[in-house]
Amino acid sequence: MVWCQFPQRLLLSLLLILVPSSLEAASALDARTLSLWQRQGMPHLLLDARPHQAYLQGHRKGAISFDVEETYRQEQGVWLAKSITAMTGEIRQRGLTLGQTIVVYDDGMLMDAARLAWVLELYGLTQVHILIDDLDKAELSIGVVTPTASSYVPALNPDVLINARMTLLAGHNPSFGIVDIRGEAHFLGKASETRKFGHIPGAINIPMDKFFYLDEKQQQHLRSWGELMALFQELDPSKRYITYCYKGKASTLGYFLMQQAGLQVTHYDGSWLDWSQRDLPVERPE
């Protein structure tokens, strides 16, 4: 793909117009608050973002299965959010409607939950919360919950999505920052899952492995909330950041965490898989 050459100042002005300054994201919800909502009978809908087979083996009581993989479409090796037409059926099937309080959870690592929450935001559902709690602490049920279908009509929310062209422009604009969530070796160009090695020009690296730690049994866990927020304390809150990874899942976790740290963030869906298929520059330290 050949990129048209426009005056840089015009392109940067266009980026400022296309990327809104007011962004919305899911909020973090702790288990104690969820328990309080349940005791008080506060209306909310609980979504299990894990694979459907895992849901069948045991899930939080009252949860509806919404396998995050059902939100993807694949185009020439690039994983993207399903079209608004396709997602309309998925959303309605789970009974989701505008103004509804939605709680999304997974196994506690937040990878699936963050991606699902981002897709729901993309299609206009803004009252979304991500549960910060290990699943093994919950009382599980094996009863499949079948919701009443809704008639929700999704509306695309441009605040949470950015494309390759806009990401390219952002690398030349001091008002923006690009955050690569891939591992350090991939950022430095020492490894790659595509034919291109390196990173998007202007990006900094906050690798996803910093979000987790290994216990004495070598099992992976999400770090404490304080440790997670500390990862972003050096970032400039006056900037607007773009997150990307390979497939667009880890970067939605980065997107969520950065939002919780008080930063303005949007997400490059398709991420490095998309970037690598285009005639776009790559930065690689010598």
Image (cartoon, rainbow, N blue to C red):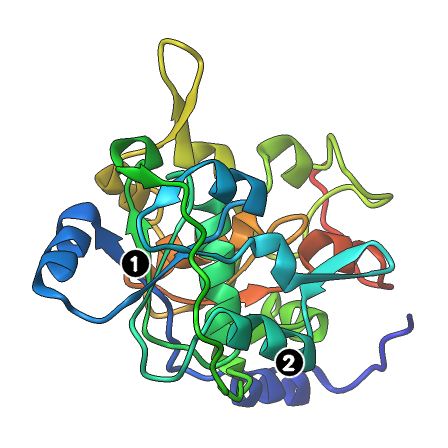
Q: Which corner quadrant holds the C terminus?
A: top right
| Left or right of 97, for residue 249 | right
Q: State the image quarter where residue 73 is shown.
A: bottom right
Pointer 1 with pointer 2, Cβ within 8 A: no
Q: Tell how many labels.
A: 2
Q: Residue at x 32, y 77 (%)?
A: 100
The answer to whether 157 is drawn above or below residue 57 in the figure is below
For residue 280, which quarter of the picture?
Answer: bottom right
Q: Is residue 14 above or below residue 244?
A: below
Taking 277 as reference, is 57 above or below it?
Answer: above
Q: Is residue 169 visible?
A: yes
Q: Residue at x 45, y 63 (%)?
A: 117
What amino acid does circle 2 point to?
Ile
Distance Cα–Cα, label 1 vs label 2: 27 Å
Q: Depth check: 3 or 213 in front?
A: 213
Check disc 1 and report its element: helix, strand or loop: helix
Residue 32 or residue 193, whichever sits in front: 32
Q: Would residue 173 be seen by someone viewing this image from the given angle?
A: no
Q: Please state which of residues 85 and 196 is positioned toward the viewer in this rendering.
A: 85
- Locate residue 179, reporting x and y percent: 52, 53
Residue 63 lies left or right of residue 200; in this view the side is: left
Where does the image place residue 23, in percent across and percent down from the top left? 39, 77
| Residue receiving disc 1 | 260
**Which residue is at 52% across, 39% downward?**
54
Query: Disc 1 marks which amino acid?
Result: Gln
What residue is drawn where x is 48% and y is 70%? 120
Crowd tier of the residue under label 1, counting other residues whose Cα lies within 10 Å: few below 14, some 14–19, many 20 or above: some
Name the quadrant of the N terminus. bottom right
The residue to which callout 2 is attached is: 84
